Each structure stands twice: as structure tokens, then as C-alpha cells.
Image: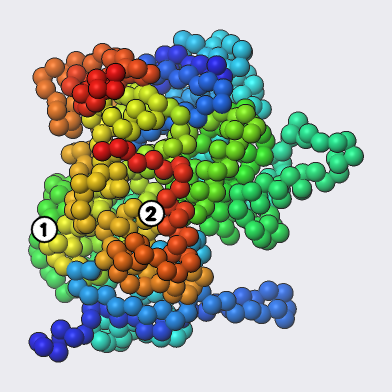
Amino acid sequence: MLLDIRNLSIQLRSETSYIQVCKNFDLMINDGEICSLVGSSGSGKSLIINAIMGMYGHDMKVTMDYFKFRDMDLTNLSVAERRKILSSEVAIIFQEARASLDPELPIGVQMRASLGSHCFDDKWYRWPFWRFRAVNNILHKVGIKNTKQILRALPYQLSEVLCQKIIIAMALSRKPKLLIADSPISGMTSTSQVQILKLFHSYVENSKGTMLYVTNDLGPASNLMDTIKMLYCGQIVESGPKEQVINCPHHPFTQSMINAIPEFNRQVKLKMKLDVLKGDPPEFTQTPIGCPLGPRCPHADRECNTMPPIVKTKNGFFRCYYPLNMEKDNESK
Amino acid sequence: MNQNKHIPLLQVKNLGLTIKNRKYLFFRKKVEILKDINFTLEKGQTLVLTGDAGSGKSSLLHILNNPDIPHTGEVLVYGKPLKDYERRDRVGFIRLLSSDYNNAINPHKRVNFILEQPLKINTDYSTVQRDYRIDRILEYVGLSSSIKYSHPGFLTSNQMLRLAFARALVMEPEILLVDSNIEKLDAQLRSHCLNMLLDCQEEKETALVICLNDIGLIKHIADNILVLSQGRQEDYGNAKFIISKPEKEITKRLIQDYNNEYRIRPER
């Protein structure tokens, strides 16, 4: 077990009181696994990443029962100490790529600065200029050809997609134990999407890495993931291996996320309306009592006013009173 | 009336755009961003622009929206060059829908101001008429009219998308340009946005020009497709025909890369 977090809860400070954003969140990632968090925008994905890495100020209150990373028990450490330990072994790819680069320094200087001396594993006589060579190699792998121009450029001169690629290159060049990717391939063309996904795949296979893949779309990278956790309003509503979640989803929210992709639904004809859930995702100040999907759910009933219990399936669980596709599950048994 | 039928809504002929790149004292280079682009667009049709990054999709959109002026060739609307129209008329034909709503909408102004300003500049409407128009457009998009007095910061993401639609539709344009930020939205919001676009096309017969990379979405909404590569027009024609039987190498590669091993399809 690489990462083990139990009962994470996050509270955000408002003017008068604290607002519960996320509660009863468990996350367990095995070695060499690609675990993915999927949820619509505003479901608290990025907040959970910040809470895990200890990147928050006084406006956020985080409590957890148990936090373990590679045989180290980090539960009782302070935030600063925990961040010191995690920073050398975990790398993050942030959502807004251009915002997370330094606007005043050239790309080359930033990339070389991110490589610590512990990243060097080669013969001793290859030490001179090893950072320059490492940066060039990783940029070629990401799919950037004219490295000379790009290393001299400042972030505002490059496009958003190029900045994303540079951030991915920076994260992978440090050879981290755990890689956290926050929607890394959104807005790219399919050619560069495949290139980046292949790179992630080889990182997990060859250098024995582990990934936490956070995304808001099930489409492009669904076969890369091992386990899928569907997140809604800071709560996991369904979890399980990828075949089970995509082929027979039990929770209505998972079903709607799959139906929103026109290719996944064969009954959709040219220019037909796609079916979406009615209404908006609720704000954190106004989360409904009981099941968070309640008012938007097409199958909701009076029973949904209370929190549905966890129902266990073969390799996962879901939280719903009226689950879908139960016959399919029985047939396979 | 019979003559009008033969003139297409939008026609682009031999469009070209070059940029002079100047470096040091004597080094000068010309870069051709767009070259020889021809297409036509009829009422109620959808044209999708695809291509790699840096192939000139958004430059083409900028020319159609008219902040940029092409160096060669011309853009014809109803058979008349776009630059010959006055701004008031031009704005009525072509509007841009920026689906990156968080950056495109001014957070300091109220919703009423955002929707009223294009009407104030481009039409001779009185205050009452403007109010009536705004109410109607809000009703069409599906927002309550009490929202007029609030700042965009108080709206949810779904409502912001509707507001972006309302701003694009206040002038009742015949051509709607949509940028490629649709793909960055999450799956629910994206299909919501596509539904609204299809609705608009069905009711008002607006023509759409959309930048997209996702072949699955292109299959669903496109009538015609224009494949660009380094500023050249590589492939143009019926979308269904081109995607099922690609002939050019770039189109083949785009479709091959889309059907990769990391995409699974559910068994139904």
C-alpha cells in the first residue's frame, strides 16, 4: 500500500462558520496502480489534492483519522513537516499550467531548478551538464521538437497546450514515487493526447510509478485507469474497477456521465439531443439533506431524504437506494 | 427572391494571412499563417474546423469575427464583402460565443450591463425596447429575469454558460462562431452546451462554425468538416463521408489517433 487515507474531511471558512466540503473520504492506492477520481466541476477534486499535499492556509480546516505513505505514519505530524516529506517523493501536475509556471524566468531555468541532485543516477564522469541533457531528453519524450527556442522562451510566449506539456515534463523528470495529475490532457489534440497517455503508461510500467489521475471526463483515458471513483459533492458515490463501472454503472450519476458522451451511447442519432441531468450541481452551502444527487435524480423517492448506506459489490461499492443495471450484475455471477 | 437562393450565406475565397517576423537587424522572414482557404456555409448548417495545434483554426475564427483583416482573398456575406458592411450590420450577422465563460465575462459588471451594451452601441432602440429584448433573450436561454441585477460571480457554472449564450444571441446573429474551449468543460456541461447549440440551430436556423478536436463530437454535430494543417486547407467536404472514408494522410492520422488503445467503449 503506497497511500492510505481514512476519513478525510475538509471544512472551508466562511464569514460566520465553517462549511463542510468533503466528508468520509477514503483513499487507498496500491503500488503500481492508476487510481482515478472522476467528477463534475465544483465537486471538490482539486481541494482533496490540496488537502493531501498540505497546500492550504488558515481558511481551510483538514482533519483525518489515518494518513500513511510508504510505511511512514504521517497522521500526527504538522502540515509543514508532512509537506517536507511528501515534496521529494510526490509530483503534481496542476490544472492551470501557465499559472503554475513562474512568469519571470525562462522555461529552461525553471526546468533545471526543479531537478534536485538526487535525480542523478549515472556514472560519476557524466556529471557535468547532466541537467541540460536530462531536460532535453524529457522534452523530446513529451513531443516538443524545437527545444532550443522553447527553453529560452518565457511562459507568456507559449500556448496553453505547450505549457501543459512542459509541466508534465517537469513532473516526470523528477522520477516521483506518486504522480498526481489534475486533468492533464484537457484541450489537447488527439495526437498529443495519445503521446502523453503513452508516457504515463510507460512511467507506471517501466519505472514502477503510481498515479492518481483526476479528471472530469470519462472519455479519453478510460482504459488507462485501473480503478474509478466517481465523486459528487465531495463524496464518493461509486467505486470499482473500470470494466464494472463503465459497462454496468449502478449509480444514476455515473450513468449520466457515460450518457453525456455521444459515442458511448449507440442509440443517439445525428444531431439528436444528448440526455443530461436537469438543474445545476448544488453549491457547498446548500447541499441537500440525504443523498446529494437527490433533487436532480430521475429515480428519486421519499426514501432519498436520508443518507443511503454503502452497498458492496464484487470489487467496489455504491451508495444508492434505487441502483440501476442490477440484473446485469446477477447474470455475471 | 429567386436570386437570393443561389447566393450562399457565407463564402470564403482564397483567404490568406501572413506575418512578418523580424529579428535582430537584418533578419526578416515571412510566415504564412493561412493560405488558399475556400468554403461556403448555408443557413442552418454546421461547419467544424479541425487540425493540429498551430494549424490556424483560431486565426480563421478571428478573421471571420473581424478583429483581423486578411491580406489576400475575401469573406463574402450574402455576396457582399464583409468589410463593406457597417459595423452595426456586421455585428448582426456574426457573433462569437466564448465558452470559456470564466474569463470572457466581466465579473465587475451586472448582467443587465453585459447584455445591454451591444444593443446600446449597435441599435437605435429606446430603453424600453432594450429592456424587452433582454427579457426575451433571458427567457429563451432559460434564466429568470430577476437575475439581471446580480453580478456574474453569484451565478453557478450552468447559469454562466447560459449567460454567455445570451450575450452571443442578443443581436440575433445568423452565424455563430464557437471557440474550442467547449472541450475543456466537464462532460455534463459540454453536452448541455451542445444541446443549446442544436436547439438554436433548429429554431432560428443559425449557421455554426465550431473549432473541435474530438472526432466523436464531430461525428455527432457536423454537416461539413474542414481539416487544416499548417495553414493549408487539406480536406473539405461532408463530415460523414470524410470520417468513414478518409483519403488524405492527415485525416487518416487524426482518426487513427482518436481510436487509440486508451479509449474503451461500453458493451451495449
- Identify which amino acid the numbered label 2 is placed on: Asp
Residue A89: image quadrant is top right
Residue A161 shows up from this direction: yes
Residue lying at 23% horizontally and 68% vertically, measured from the top left: B45
Q: For mark 2, what is the residue?
A: B214
Neighbour tally class for label 2: few under 14, some 14-19, many 20 plus, Cα within 10 Å: some
A328 is higher (above) or lower (below) than B147: above
- Label 1 neighbourhood size at 10 Å, few (<14), some (14-19), many (20+)? some
Q: Secondary structure at mark 2?
A: loop
Q: Quadrant of residue B136?
A: bottom left
Do the residues bearing badges 1 and 2 touch, measured as CB atoms within 8 Å?
A: no
Mark 1: secondary structure: helix
Q: Which quadrant would the N terminus of chain A be assigned to in this image?
A: top right
**Which amino acid lies under the numbered mark 1 shown in the image of this protein?**
Arg
Choose between A202 and B35: the one closer to the eye: A202
The residue that disc 1 covers is B136
Q: Residue furthest right?
A: A125
- What color scheme is it? rainbow
Residue in the image at 37% along x and 84% along y: B13
Indicate whether A135 appears above or below B98: above
Vertical placement of residue A2 versus B232, above or below: above
